Amino acid sequence: MFKGKKYVDSAKLIDKSMQYEVADAMDLVVKSAKAKFDETVEIHIKLGVDSRHADQQVRGAIVLPNGTGKTRKVLVFAKDAKLDEAKAAGADFAGGMDLVEKITKENWFDFDVVVATPDMMGVVGRLGKVLGPKGLMPSPKAGTVTPNVEAAVKEIKAGKIEYRLDKTNIIHCPIGKASFGTEKLVENFNALMGAVIKAKPAAAKGQYVRSCTLASTMGPGVKVSTAKF
């Protein structure tokens, strides 16, 4: 696979055989983010669980102390007074059956997060087959099925992110932009890692955090020491 000159130069900064302390790893990620745009910094955490078992699922949401650096478009399914609440809180789109039809008939997906009031889940459930595979289905665990749409929208706009296992038992999450600098990114890292550790299922056996890697959008991965986790 072809690697650009910037990537090759960045890769020289990193010792692939080494697991770095969080601050050192983050420093390397920031230094190796050399693209012409503000790269997103992502964390990849491999957990010692089996996501095929319901009692070993790891999923939740957290507001990062320094946000994500990205403004996310929020769609809210609600009715009556809750619709007005959602719009006042800053929802980009709010509605009911009209939005269900727009998604199904027009293949419209111009949003990043979906929030729904509990009384709308019967309607939203019809979209399971299209929202589910995209990771957009609202869920109580992620705080996106809630009667308090105002708080949900404000938290998402403030930098709330959802974390969940993929099929290979890895959590992939953005934790900010390279321009945040090491200190703010480490704060976000610690907040997310703390939430993931708190969400450890009782059924998980053995080492919980197997590995952790940080990387910017275009940069090489940097391994983080998991000893203290």
Image (cartoon, rainbow, N blue to C red):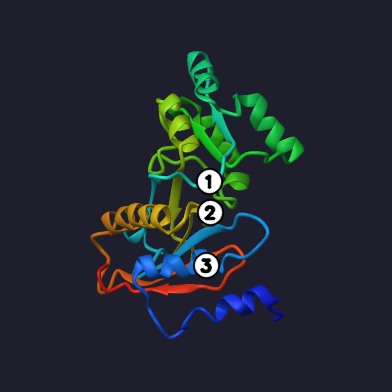
First along the sequence among labels 3 and 1: 3
Q: Is residue 62 left or right of residue 10?
A: left
Which of pointers 2 and 1 indicates the residue nearer the eye?
A: 2
Identify the secondary structure beneath mark 2: helix
Q: Please give the label number shown on residue 69.
A: 1
Instruction: Tell me whether circle 3 and circle 2 mark residues in contact (CB < 8 Å).
Output: no
Which of pointers 3 and 1 indicates the residue nearer the eye?
A: 3
* Residue 70 percent across, percent down from the top left: 56, 44
Identify the secondary structure beneath mark 3: helix
Return the residue at label 2. Answer: 179
Instruction: Tell me whether circle 3 and circle 1 mark residues in contact (CB < 8 Å).
Output: no
First along the sequence among labels 3 and 2: 3
- Taking the spot 59% from the left edge, 37% from the top edge, the residue there is 73
Mark 3 belongs to which amino acid?
Lys
How would you rate the neighbour count of disc 1 (Cα within 10 Å): few for under 14, some for 14-19, many for 20 or more? some
Which residue ends up furthest to the top in the rendered image? 81
Identify the secondary structure beneath mark 1: loop
- Taking the spot 51% from the left edge, 59% from the top edge, the residue there is 41
User: Gap in Å between the C-alphas at discs 3 and 2?
Assistant: 10 Å
How would you rate the neighbour count of disc 2 (Cα within 10 Å): few for under 14, some for 14-19, many for 20 or more? some
User: Gap in Å between the C-alphas at discs 2 and 1?
Assistant: 9 Å
Regarding residue 169, the answer to whether it shows in the image is: no
* Residue 38 percent across, percent down from the top left: 61, 54
Instruction: Tell me whether circle 2 and circle 1 mark residues in contact (CB < 8 Å).
Output: yes
Give the camera-side residue of 152 and 96. 152
Give the camera-side residue of 27 and 221. 27
Return the residue at label 3. Answer: 31
